[in-house]
Amino acid sequence: MIPEIEEMYEESKIVYNSMYWSYMLLTKKITFDELIERDEEFGLIYNPDELTELTPEVKIDLINVLIEYFVEEEEYEKCQELVNAKKLYK
């Protein structure tokens, strides 16, 4: 594979990973402790230690970022779940 394409592919995997696990945590499909126990490499779009300290508005902003991302990925079921999750943070 061409090195530039391979690098772009790896970067897109890292972004997807961060968005996916952030989605899983914000929709309460997994807890942070469960995620750590999976012993996988993961990234998040926010610091999970600060989630309880974030205002509802910031949490909704994070959800909106995830919705935009998953719309681009055409993962509409995740988008719907994220729209529903906004109610948890209002």
Image (tube, rainbow, N blue to C red):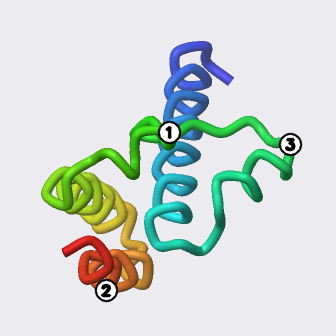
The location of residue 52, given as percent across then percent down, is 39, 52
The quadrant of the picture occupied by the N terminus is top right
Q: Which residue is mark 3?
A: 39
Is residue 52 rendered to the left or right of residue 55? Answer: right
Q: CA distance from mark 1 to mark 2?
A: 23 Å
Question: Earlier along the polypeptide chain: callout 1 or callout 2?
Answer: 1
Q: Secondary structure at mark 3?
A: loop
Which residue is at a point 73% across and 53% down the rendered structure image?
33
User: Outermost residue toward the top?
Assistant: 3
Q: Which residue is mark 1?
A: 49
User: Residue 14 versus residue 54: which sits nearer the camera?
Assistant: 54
Residue 9 left/right relative to 38: left
Where residue 62 sits in the image (x, y, percent)? 27, 53
Left or right of 81: which side holds 6?
right
Mark 1: few/some/many CA within 10 Å (<14, 14-19, 20+): few
Q: Secondary structure at mark 2?
A: helix
Residue neighbourhood size for the residue with mark 3, other residues' Cα within 10 Å, grouped as few (<14), some (14–19), many (≥20): few
Proximity of marks 1 and 3: CB atoms separated by less than 8 Å = no
Q: Residue 22: percent from the left, percent from the top? A: 48, 53
* Farthest left residue in view: 57
Is tag 2's residue or tag 3's residue first in the polypeptide sequence?
Answer: 3
Quarter of image, res 5: top right
- Of labels 1 and 2, the one closer to you: 1
For the point 61% across and 24% down, the residue is 6
Please state which amino acid type lies under the numbered disc 3: Asp
Residue at image coords 85%, 50%: 37
Q: Residues within 10 Å of mark 2 (few under 14, many from 20)?
A: few
Left or right: residue 23 versus residue 34 is left
Whichever of labels 1 and 3 marks the residue nearer the N terminus, that label is: 3
Gap between marks 2 and 3 measured at Cα? 29 Å
Q: Which residue is mark 2?
A: 84
- In this rendering, is residue 42 above or below 56? above
